[in-house]
Image (cartoon, rainbow, N blue to C red):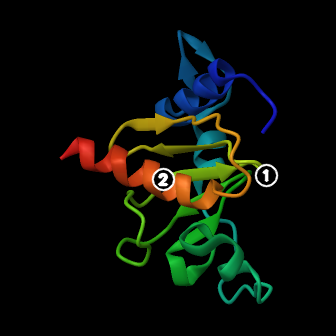
């Protein structure tokens, strides 16, 4: 991800609001719906390293996830050990930055961290902390 936290927050708010932020329409509702929908065909194959490399964040059916237009989307409840809702969207950068949007809980997060060695663990911990705070 190459951007500012403010720009990514605006992008996430657009996904959350389904196209409008501050009275400005940046995409149609149908475009946002297409972005947020899973576009992977049934039976898609993954390289053997995908689950090991990404763990619970792997966009695989086994993890209850697919891939929309530009990011991973959660397609099923109960298959992923990370907290979240069906329909949430996620993308991570190479050195630890990431965002996720949960339209059911009406929240998003844009952690702009630089933690190449511990990025997956940090992403897991942050998601758990955010959802625990909602209870």
Disc 1 element: loop
Disc 2 element: loop
Ranked by sequence position, the earlier of labels 2 and 1 is 2
Q: Is residue 86 visible?
A: yes
What residue sits 73% from the left and 79% below the top? 50
The quadrant holding residue 118 is: bottom right
The quadrant holding residue 37 is: bottom right
What residue sits 72% from the left and 22% below the top? 4
Q: CA distance from mark 2 to mark 1?
A: 20 Å
Split into 4 quadrants, where in the image is the N terminus?
A: top right
Q: Mark 1 highlights which residue?
A: 94
Viewer-closest of 25 and 96:
96
What residue sits 81% from the left and 33% below the top? 2
Q: Mark 2 highlights which residue?
A: 88
What residue sits 64% from the left and 54% below the top? 119
**Label 1 crowd bin: few (<14), some (14–19), many (20+), radius 10 Å:** few
Report x, y in % for residue 83: 37, 60
């Amino acid at each position: 991800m190459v951007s500012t936290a403010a720009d990514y927050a605006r992008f996430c708010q657009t996904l959350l609001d389904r196209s409008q932020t501050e009275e400005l329409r940046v995409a149609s509702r149908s475009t946002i719906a297409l972005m947020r929908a899973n576009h992977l065909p049934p039976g898609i194959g993954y390289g053997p390293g995908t689950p090991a490399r990404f763990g619970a964040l792997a966009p695989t059916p086994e993890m209850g996830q697919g891939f929309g237009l530009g990011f991973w989307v959660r397609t099923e409840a109960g298959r992923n050990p990370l907290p979240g809702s069906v329909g949430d969207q996620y993308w991570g950068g190479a050195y630890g930055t990431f965002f996720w949007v949960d339209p059911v809980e009406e929240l998003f997060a844009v952690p702009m961290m630089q933690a190449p060695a511990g990025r997956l663990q940090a992403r897991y911990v942050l998601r758990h902390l955010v959802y625990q705070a909602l209870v």
